[in-house]
Amino acid sequence: MAFMKRFFARKDANEESTRTESSSPTTTEKRTLKGRLSRTSGGFGQALRSAFGAHTDEEIWQGVEDALLMADVGIAATQKIVSAARKRAGRTATEVEVLSALKAEIRAILDDHSDRDVHGSEEGMSVVLVVGVNGTGKTTSTGKLAHRWVQEGFSVVLGAADTFRAAAADQLETWATRAGATIVRGPEQGDPAAVAFDAVSRGLELGADVVLLDTAGRLHTKAGLMDELSKIRRVVERRAAIDEVLLVIDATTGQNGVAQAKVFAEAVDVTGIVLSKLDGTAKGGVVIAVQELLGVPVKYVGIGEGVEDLIDFNATDFVDALFE
């Protein structure tokens, strides 16, 4: 079974073009993202308007830089964007030309990671590991992914391998019931690797399409984290390969979230980012910072508390929403 192509890969552009605008999932998500990114786009837009009220080119570009930093794009990405946009726009650029150059350079950073599919096994069962600091929305994001994938017609086994946080397994079990997924859990304070192994074994027994593992989110020491995640990977891979490692980052924490994420990225081979709570922050530019600093694509963004408020990340839609 070509699970990756059937399940994880995004819709073909030609297929999307045959849909009407009213029925297109891409159009719906774009409209929703614009509305949910209003806290970031409002402040960013106001800061840009102030910048264009300056008298000299140097003051305008300084204002643009300040606007990007205010949106939490980060110092490295901001400097890269502004430097490239100034060259693209020219010395006597109009406001329209400056905005066009900014959009183009932001898209260039985001498009460095154009492969946003979640890759699964070409044949048999796929295994997806979800990691991140406690409080980022990791377990909730795991549940939303399960719900989404079950709705698309695939059988999902959830592994409650976050055994150290009180009620984490209960929370995931609620999501499993809601989604129609099977859950495997162990005793509180139990061995996360053992739960992960049991979940993968259960998935194989059931002939499941995907096993989705919610791991412990303790950010203790880097060495301890690496040991714990390495053990989970080593134990799971006795039964099946891990196809994806998704790192959940809380967008509301901005650069602090990026710093925490770097520890996880160094501890385990992260293949994609889930950026949660994007609707609740004025720092939505962290999407750009994440990809610039971690070199890992943002694959999903959380834009609300609803069960379907975890959507595919689309760079064009994000840039449009940011400049709305």
Image: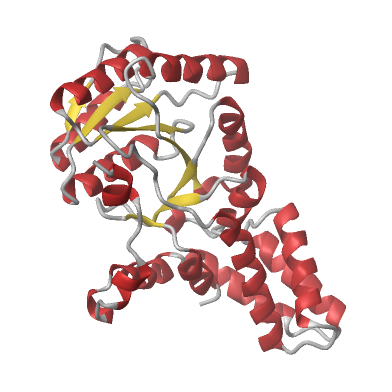
Residue 112, image quadrant: bottom right
Residue at figure coordinates x 25%, y 30% from the top left: 158
Above or below, 44 relative to 180: below
Q: State the residue in front, 134 or 208.
A: 208
Q: Position of residue 221 (x, y in %)?
A: 60, 18
Q: State the residue in front, 285 or 130.
A: 130
Above or below, 60 relative to 137: below
Q: Position of residue 74 (x, y in %)?
A: 69, 53
Above or below, 269 relative to 256: above
Left or right of residue 295, residue 320 in this image: left
Residue at figure coordinates x 62%, y 43% from the top left: 294
In this rendering, the count of numbered labels is 0
Considering the image in quadrants, where does the N terminus appear?
top left
What colour scheme does the image use? secondary structure
Residue at figure coordinates x 24%, y 18% from the top left: 201
Q: State the residue in front, 235 or 311.
A: 235
Q: Position of residue 97 (x, y in %)?
A: 70, 85
Left or right of residue 56, residue 5 in this image: left
Q: Position of residue 89 (x, y in %)?
A: 76, 81
* Residue 164 in view here: no
Left or right of residue 171, residue 282 in this image: right
Above or below, 169 relative to 57: above
Residue 240, image quadrant: top left
* Residue 220 in view here: yes
